[in-house]
Amino acid sequence: MQEYKLFINGEWATSSTGETFDDVNPATLETIGKLQKASIEDVKSAVDSADDAFGKWSATPAPQRAKILFRAASMLEDRKEELSRLLTMEMGKVLKEARGDVQEAIDITYYAAGEGRRLFGETTPSELPDKFCMTIRRPIGVVGLITPWNFPMAIPAWKIMPALIAGNTLVIKPASDTPILSIELVKILEKAGLPGGVLNLVMGEGSTVGSAIVHHPKIRAVSFTGSLETGKWILGEAARDMKKVSLELGGKNPIIVMEDADLDLAVDGIIWGAFGTTGQRCTAASRVIAHEKIIKELQAKLIKRTKALRLGNGLLDTVDVGPVINNSQLRKIAQYVDIGKNEGANLVLGGRVVKPLAGYFFEPTIFTDVTPDMRIAREEIFGPVVSMLSAADVDEAIRIANSVEYGLSSSIYTASMRNAFRAIEKIEAGITYINASTIGAEIHLPFGGVKSTGNGTREAGTTAIEEFTEIKTVYIDYSGKLQKAQIDV
Ligand code: UN1
């Protein structure tokens, strides 16, 4: 059995308590690794080593830091297939999507490395003569990263790479269900030449290890992707020490389908958005809001196509939908199906736990006749369940889209420019797709959401550099005399 250790101060270390836990393949329930469970003492050592490493790393020119990232990106590329297979075994998503997860990590690593030659600030004139003004970006310090299980490689890379290029030192806690890909990422960075202490990895429960990261006084910023509940808790705790926080939380992402849409294209997008990654993306399409004139036809097409999806082990290319991550998620999804039925929604397909293998499988599920007040239309399920709602026109569809507390991704299928721009302007979401599904954001554009999806920050794109830097404003007076801004002479 492969053992995976903590990474502290450039060394692979066992936990100070010696405790371990298992990493289980959600399709087969085979244990694929033994993981060291960090103690609060281990977290302290990790933060101390990041703090010690900060001076040197932050003083290293960003293009030099970038060299390490370029090497890491190319090593990731060389190992893409092997890492993708490992990712499917650990997380369950089908191999094609696992390759996408690894590719997203490769993309952000190259992108962040390139940013090492830019990290632009602004230059402006001064209101006074012989004076120059500019902004520069400075690293924040020691940053804590807490990542989810649904993108075991892409999301850690989204956070690690921009944070490193900006000159921060890090402590990462990957999700307990899927830490192996983060460990592989750390190993690659280590091989690529990252100095000891710059990146530290601890594993264990959120309530102990995660909490110790959030509370440590030397941690100056926390970047978290996960549930709304945990996000709110982190924001509250971090506020006491004025830590910078960036949160990427839930979604209840709508696909609007108008009466003038290409319905087959819309069905492609719904299937990809709702059942891709077994519905376990923050960006998953969990609501379809269709024009009343075409909803029946759309439903018939969707049901037919969904029936053909094959569940099983994601390593096989005959499989379309993999397992869900663990038993508690499986139970939660089943509970939501009961809630939907009790609320009076019409379960037209799926709705059951199935066992093509020993693991945690749930049938792709469709509810029709869903109304906006039902819990299945409002709450994030994070499973292969889609709710169909009907609207009389584009404005009603957008009103329904906006009636939930989340605002991450959104989509509209329409042939009309007017409808498309209505959606672009009026949907309350961080991302709007036109004639494409809600998933598949590209790494060079900002990623994040409004309302309860986050706290106003964005990941990826140039906004990732904003996430992991502080702006310093610099005034350079070369007049040789005292000059006073704002004061009449
Ligand atoms: C997530 O589910 O938290 O846009 C991230 C997408 C992916 C990232 C999803 N590129 O679906």
Image (spheres, rainbow, N blue to C red):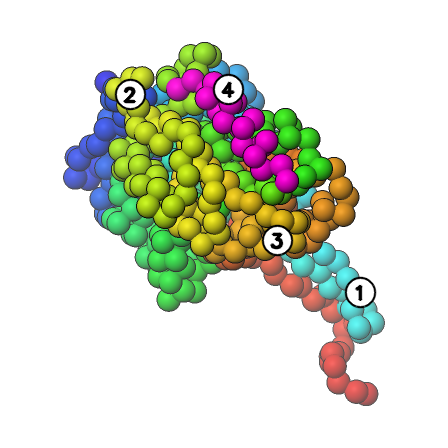
Nearer to us in this view, 49 or 325: 325
For marks 3 and 2, give the CA distance: 40 Å
Q: Quadrant of residue 232?
A: bottom left
Image point (69%, 35%), residue name? 261
Residue 355: assigned label: 2
**Is residue 195 in view from this perspective?**
no
For marks 1 and 4, give the CA distance: 51 Å
Residue at the spot of label 1: 125
Residue 60 appears left or right of 321: right
Q: Using a 10 Å C-alpha cutoff, classify the residue at mark 4 as few (fewer than 14 neighbours), some (14 to 19) or many (20 or more).
A: some
Question: Residue 78 at x, y = what percent?
Answer: 52, 17
In primary-sequence order, the first of circles 4 and 2 is: 4
In primary-sequence order, the first of circles 1 and 4 is: 4
In primary-sequence order, the first of circles 3 and 2 is: 2
Nearer to us in this view, 321 or 235: 321
The C terminus: image quadrant: bottom right
Residue 486 appears left or right of 221: right
Examine the structure image and report whether residue 165 is included in the region drawn in magenta: no
Q: Using a 10 Å C-alpha cutoff, classify the residue at mark 3 as few (fewer than 14 neighbours), some (14 to 19) or many (20 or more).
A: some
